[in-house]
Structure formats: structure tokens, C-alpha cells
Image: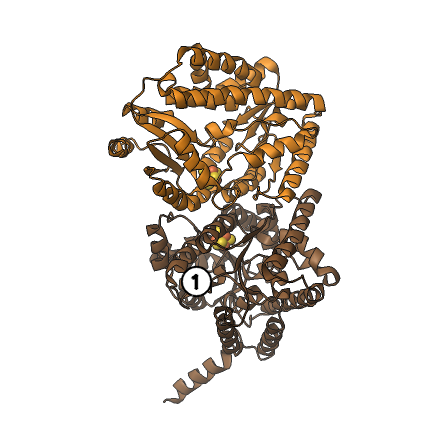
Chain colours: A orange, B brown
Amino acid sequence: MEQFTRFHEVAADAAGYARQWKERTRGRVVATLCSYAPEEILLAANVLGFRILGTESPIILADAHLQSYSCTLVRGALEEALAGRLDYIDGVVFPHTCDSIQRLSDIWRMNVKTGFHMDLVLPADLTTQASLDYMTAIMETFAQDLGEKLGTGISREDLGAAVLTCNQIRSAVMRIHALRNKVPEAISGTDLHAMVRAGMVMDRNEFLSLVTPLADALEAEYPTSQFHGKRILVAGGLCNMPDLFDVIEQTGSRVVMDDLCTGSRFFQGLIEPDSDLFRAIAHRYQSRIVCPAKHSGIRARGEALVRMAKESRADGVMFFCLKFCDPFGFDYPYIKEMLDENQVPSMLYELEDSLAADGQFETRCQAFIEML
Amino acid sequence: MSTKENARDGEKERTKIRCVKTMKDIMTTYYIDAKTAKENGKKVAWITSGGPVEPLIAMDVIPVYPENHGAMIGATKMGDDLCAKAEDMGYSRDLCSYARADIACATINGGPIGGLPRPDMLVCCNNICGTVLKWYEVQARYFNVPLFILDTPITHTDYSKAQHRYVADQFKNYLKFLEAHCGKPFDFDRMEEVGRLSLKGQKLWQAVLDTTMNSPAPMSAFDAFFHLALIVTLRGTQIAVDYYQALLDEMNERVSLSISAVPREEIRLMWDNLPVWYRTKWLSDTFAGHNACLVADTYTSAWCSSLRYLDENDFFNSMVEGYSRIYLNTGVDAMAEEVLTMVARYKADGLVMHSNRSCKPYSLGQYDIQRIVQERAGIPVLVMEADMCDSRNFSESQIQTRIEAFMELVRASL
Ligand code: SF4
Ligand code: SF4
């Protein structure tokens, strides 16, 4: 479908897209580092929210600031910034997640010139009323500060409209995810990945204008499934390599669901109408499945994954994580154990940089799928 | 015995820190009390090293510190086996070695004291790192006991009103949690007393550390690593106050008698990050071999790093800011400023930074601090990569070579 072509174009050169967008609209680009940066507020401020990932270039400059035992997302993002490849950025937002991002924020602020620097110091415990109150308060301050930095200000109407747009995007994207689960052959993992990536960097209105018709068209074209291969659930830490899906699907299986912050989780959960929109934004973050660096009860993530595996009738779970990711590392053993108890087979693959070219991943992947 | 040997033994006796024995006795009693808590009808809470322990003491709960236990595991060189056991359980080798050792130890009651006493509750304050949050989740699942989280957002560049309110709210919840799990109302009078003792202990500890402003220094950072145990585990008790008073007296006596930690102190160095527990003796000897004394460190002083926010007359409420603004919960630039202040205060000729694979909030950013200190204090800085508890990440020959080169630099810059 033509929309996928556009998504692949954007995903293949996100920086190029941002540069063109800037030139065309005279607007400003604000980089973010994780899915806890409130999309709605950025959109209401009329900036292009741009999720940055690691680098595809060798890491050289960042080595002067970060030890080798930090994950490649952190090192790669800094490399991009230090090498001047983020020159299209007018500001950056660091939501507080893990220890490595926390320190990256400091190092960035001290060494990089990418416009303004904002820390969104989120709570780590997302279970209490106190943290909901706190998150509401900092969302409001964030909107004020951002408005001031841009010299525009964000009105309630702007925010209301942005919430609506983001909700529409989320609904459409989740419909596509649901369809993939029901009719796995409808969308390839690679296409889906390109769509998700585009959704994190494209003008949100443009993205919405593509994604809703896409959901309609896909649903119309694929009412039922003929798929009999293995159904895979992908989970774990950050992952932005389409060939990963390719490799999985080359075995004849399909990725029917994911729990990635660079995947479906980015779009999960709608903002419920509330007279206090900041509270509504905070509430969404508290109710969706949390990132491993956050707390939502001692078994919440494991239970959610088991539920997801059952709902998606997954034959197996493939975990991916970046080496040196502490939050994931602590969660993995118990989640795996919960999957085992529920007779859901799983495998873990740790990525250092990108996938090794030696075919090791292909072999592991094939072996796992044959075993299912 | 020759007169020479006699003299050497006499000198050794004279320079030994007498309080060491007292400390060992206190810690033994403390761990016996903790391990027999159940028989004595007392409750045990595991708590993170940067957590607010005073309310526990006020409620007569025995606080136990897995991190202090981690240090003991490291010092007794039992870290490697326990860490490897955690890896067998599925925990990545890249995770904090205290956490790995503790998680493994709990399942087999291993380690130097046969495991820690089973907790009745867990109190986790993330002002030191996000690791403790995940680690305590693991233990809450394992022991199936209530977990209280005191979430203290980082203060990169400022400490906002919103975060103050947030932490203050949680302190109220902390009391409710304690009341519920101890089955009695919170004792505010006792709290006031505990707060007073805590503050007194912290001030005394700071005074002990400050005796190294003298040249030669009566103690070294390696001594501080050892004597630190009480300000962590028994903060808020009379025992800690008495102990640090005695230690302070002894240090002052050493100053007046010119007894130094390193016999011919010529070079004064500062240490950053946690100790390398399984190699403290080797490191201490290596530096002493260069007539260098590690006179101060950022680690042991962290337990008095928020003294300026604590208020003797309103200790409970001042804890909100005090526990939010400890050293590790600030930005890298603020940490660099603190290091610079210490370099000047203790007249350090060089800085040794332990780049600790286990501890990201402490270690990431060290390269920037290194550069800032070199530029602004004009002293050489050594960054050596190791780990506090897992000696599989320690390369002795490599570190030896680097220390040699560093000492030459320091000498040349004197
Ligand atoms: S991959 Fe893990 S360590 Fe890296 S930024 Fe994400 S949560 Fe942090
Ligand atoms: S060593 Fe660092 S990561 Fe480990 S518990 Fe202590 S502060 Fe946290």
C-alpha cells in the first residue's frame, strides 16, 4: 500500500525528513529520548516531536564522555549529537527513565549545543496518588516552560486539539496492530516497523492523514486469515532494526504482537477526557504498561506479558534487549519464569550494536522457531 | 626478636587505629541482634543505603542494609561466586554486583554471615540509583513481603517545589506504611530524638573525615571505607554517636602525635566512587608504596552530603529535602563542583576515579568530571576501570601500570 511506501521513505531518512519539514514549515524540531515525552504537549506547542534513536555510524566522539558499559542507545545518541548530525534540532527533552539516560542528560547539557535542554523529571513509581499528582504538576510546568522557550505559549484549546489528534493516531495504529494479530499476513513486520518509526518523527497531522485510511483499507482487504505459521510475540528493550523482523518472518512465522517502547507501547492507551488535561496525560502514563525502568507493582510487567501472549495466541516470545540495559536485565528472569509457568516458550537475544553479520541471529531464530 | 623487629612491631602497634576493634564488636552485635530479631519479637526492614532510616529506628524496627552486606561479600572475596550464581539464575553479568550478590545470597543463605535475616518489609529509596528499585522488586517477589518505595526524583539542576511536595507526600505514606506493618502508632517524640542523634552522628562523621585536612593525614580513605559502616547502619542511634566521638578523639590524638596513615606522606590523593572491596589492601599498599595517602573520597562523605538541608528542630520535615538532594541525586556538573571543593579543602594533589561497571549513576559522567578537575584544579586525574564486588572485572597488572604512570605525573606536577 502506498502509505507504507511513504513510511519506509521517512523511516529510512528521518533526519532528512525533519530537515525538509523545517524548511517547508519554518517550524521547530524538538528531540525526545523516550515514549514518556508527552506527544500532546509537543504537538500543542506546534513543534515536530522527533524521537531520536542510536547511531548507525561508529561511536568515536561519545567515547570521551561515556564508558563502554553504557547501552548503545545512550552512546549512539550522544555520538549523533557530538558529530553535529542533529543540527536540525531546536531543543531536546529528556524524560527521566533509567540511570543511563539520567546521566546522558547531564552530559548532553554540558557538552552539546542542540538548542534548549529540558529535563522532564518523572516519577519512577507510577502506582500512587502522590505520583499522579506530581506527574500532573510537572506536565503542566513542562507545557509552560516549553511555551516560554518557544515564545509562543500553549493554550488550553491547543492542548485539547492535540490530545484529540494523538488519540486518533493511537486508535488507528492500534487498529492496525489488532489486525496484524488477527490476520498476520496482512502486514509484514518490516512495514509495521516503518509505520511505527514514521509515527515518531513525522508531522503528526500528516501521519494521521495516512494512517487512518491505511487502517480502513487493511481491514477491508484482510477480513480473515489463512495464516498457519508460528505466531511470535516480540518483547524487551529498545529495537529499531527492521531486518530483525525480516529474519523472523523469513522462517515462515509472523510477529503478531510486540511489547516494545519503540513499538506498540508508544501508541498504547488513549487519553480519557478530563477537565484537567495534564492529569489526563499523566493518567495515561500511569495506566499503560510501564517501561521496565518504572514501577507499577512487582509483577505487573510479567502479568501483562503473559496476558498479551495469551491474547495474541503467541506460540513463542522473542526477547530482545540492548546490552547494558539494567532495567530490562532485572525483569527478564522473573518474566521468563512466568512465561515458563504458562507454557509459553521464549528466547533472549542480546544486541550490542546492530545485528551481527555472521548469521548468528538467523541461526538462533531458526532453531527457536523449529522448536515451537 | 631483634631490636629492629621489636621497634617495627612497636611502631605498628602505635599507628594502629584502636577503634577498629570497637567497630568490629559493634557490627557483630548488630548482626546478631538482626539475625535474632524474630526471637526477640522485633521486626526487620531491609533498606537502601541512601534511604531514610530514622523513622524505622523510631519504630524500633531493625534496619538491615543489603549494600553493607554487599560490601562485606566483596571484602571477603565471595562476590565472584555469588555473582556467577545470579548469572545462572538469569541475571545479566552487566548488572550491579551488589544486587547480583544479594539476589543470589538470599536463595542460599550464603556469604560471610550465612545470609541476611529475612525481612518483614522492604524500604527502597531511589535517591542513589534506579537499580535499587528493580533489585527491591526482585526481593519483594522472593520474600513476598510489603515494599515501600520512596521515590526521590533527581535534581539535575534544580529542586522544584513540585518534587518537594511529592517527596513530602510520600514521607507521610511512609509513616502510614510503618504504622500498618508495625501495628502501632508512629512515635513522633521518639522520632525527634532519633533525628537529633542522626544529625549528631553525621556531624561527627564529617568531623572525623575532616581530620585528614591535616598533613600528614591521621587516616586514609581506606580507613574511612571501614569506619563508614555505622553511619550507614546505625545512623540515628546513641551507639553511632558514641563511636564517632571516640573515633574523632582518637584521630585528634593522632594528629597531635603526628601519627599518619601513610608513614611518609608526600602525596595527597582523593578517591571517587565506591571502593574496590576485594582489593582495598592491595590498593592501599600500592599507593602507600609511593608515599601517597588517599586523604578524602566522595563516597564516605556522601553520608553527610545533605547536612546543610537538615534541621535539628524539624528533622522529620527537613528529611524531605535532605534525602532528595544527596550527592548521587544531583547533576554531573554539581558533582564536579563538589569534587573541586573537596580537592581544595583536603589539598589533594591528584584524583583517582574508580570507573565502576556496577554503578552507572556514579560512573557515567566521570570523564567530564575528570576534564573539569584537570582544567580547573590543574591536578592529574586517573580513571581506572573496575568493579566494587566482582573481581572478574579487575585487571591487576593493567591497573598497576596505570597507577605507576599516574604517580609519575602527580610527582612531576607537585
Ligand atoms: S536501552 Fe535500557 S539502558 Fe538503554 S536507554 Fe533504554 S532503558 Fe536505558
Ligand atoms: S552500587 Fe550503584 S547501582 Fe549498585 S546499588 Fe549502589 S548506587 Fe545502585
**From the viewer's perspective, is residue A48 above or below residue B193?**
above
Q: Is residue A360 left or right of residue A13?
A: left
User: Where does residue B34 sit, x and y in percent of width and height?
Assistant: 50, 69
Horizontal side of residue A306 vs B154, given as left or right: left
Q: Quadrant of residue A114?
A: top right
Q: Is mark 1 within 8 Å of ligand 2?
A: no
Position of the C terminus of chain A, as image quadrant, is top left
B402 versus A167 height, above or below: below
Q: Quadrant of the N terminus of chain A?
A: top left
Asked if one can make out residue A49 in the rendered structure from this viewpoint, the answer is yes
Residue A155 visible in this rendered orientation of the protein: no
- Inspect the image, locate mark 1, and give the three-letter code of the amino acid beneath it: Trp
Q: Which class describes the residues within 10 Å of circle 1: few (<14), some (14-19), or many (20+)?
A: many
Residue at image point 53% right, 16% down:
A207
In this orientation, which residue lies closer to the viewer: B249 or B321? B321
| Mark 1 element type | helix
The percent position of residue A90, horizontal first and vertical second, equals: 60, 26
Residue holding disc 1: B277
**What's the residue at 38%, 56% (across, down)?**
B104
Q: Compared with residue B296, is residue A188 higher up or lower down, i.e. above or below? A: above
Judge by depth and name the residue closer to the eye, B148 or B414: B148
Instruction: Please state if A228 lies on the left or on the right of A14 as rendered.
Output: left
- Quarter residue B7 falls in: bottom left
Return the residue nearer the eye: B168 or B39: B39
Q: Is residue B98 left or right of residue B235?
A: left
Residue A215 percent location from the top left of the image:
47, 15
